[in-house]
Each structure stands twice: as structure tokens, then as C-alpha cells.
Amino acid sequence: MIENDRPKAPQMVAKFLNMPPDLAKELMPKLEYDMYWRDETLDAIQDSEQLLQKQGKMKGPFDYQGYIYIDLLKKVRPQSVTLSKLMLG
């Protein structure tokens, strides 16, 4: 979504995160959209998961193993997967 419609992306992100649109517009160009699975990545996703649950935008825990295939990612792009801890579903 972000890559396909850059002009609308800040508005959608601002609405979803409940933040001022001007702030989202300022931050969007500074973000990296390539996916690396590091310990920090998992920590950030888990923080977001908890926030979304508190906001009522997510009803239960995210099923990591049902949507993220770390073994496959390691085969396809091993340099992008450096997790030292397991993702629990």
C-alpha cells in the first residue's frame, strides 16, 4: 500500500495510528520498507500487537507461524533473517 500509493499512504497511516496527518507525512519518507527479521523487528511487531489489542483494533494474539514462514525466508534471503529467538504463535 505504501509503495503503490505514496500520496495517500500518510493519510491512511495517520488514521490507523491515530496520529496527526502532518506528522505521518513527515515521517513516511524516513522509513525503510524492506523487511529484515531481527530480534528488534520481532520486538517492534510485538509492541504493535499489544498496542492494537489495547486499542481494540486486534482481538487476539497474532499467529506468527500461520503468516510468517521464517524457514522459507531463510532459504530465499538468508541475509535478511537473523533472529536469535523463536517466534511463538
Image (tube, rainbow, N blue to C red):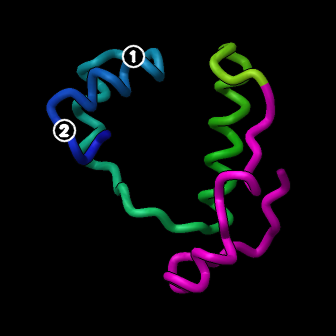
The residue nearer to you, when weighing 25 against 49, is 49
Q: What stretch is highlighted in magenta?
A: 60-89
39 horizontally vs 5: left or right: right
Say which element carries label 1: helix
On screen, residue 57 above or below 46: above
- Crowd rating for badge 1 (residues with CA inside 10 Å; few <14, some 14–19, many 20+): few
The amino acid type of the residue labelled 1 equals: Lys
The residue nearer to you, when weighing 42 against 77, is 77
69 horizontally vs 22: left or right: right
Instruction: Kindly indicate whether the residue at mark 1 contacts the one at mark 2 (C-beta within 8 angstroms).
Output: no
Q: Picture coordinates of residue 41 (x, y %)?
A: 60, 58
Q: Picture coordinates of residue 51 (x, y %)?
A: 67, 27
Is residue 71 one of those drawn in magenta?
yes
Tag 1 residue: 15
- Give the residue at x 66% y 15%: 55
Label whose residue precedes the other's in the sequence (2 or 1): 2
- Give the residue at x 36% y 21%: 14
Say which element carries label 2: loop
87 horizontally vs 46: left or right: right
Tag 2 residue: 6
- Give the residue at x 66% y 66%: 69
On screen, residue 37 above or below 43: below
Q: Picture coordinates of residue 28 (x, y %)?
A: 28, 40
Q: How far apart are marks 2 and 1 (CA)?
A: 15 Å
Residue 26: image quadrant is top left
The amino acid type of the residue labelled 2 equals: Arg
- Give the residue at x 39% y 16%: 15
The residue nearer to you, when weighing 31 against 34, is 34
Q: How many labels does the image show?
A: 2
On screen, residue 76 above or below 66: below
Quadrant assignment for the N terminus: top left
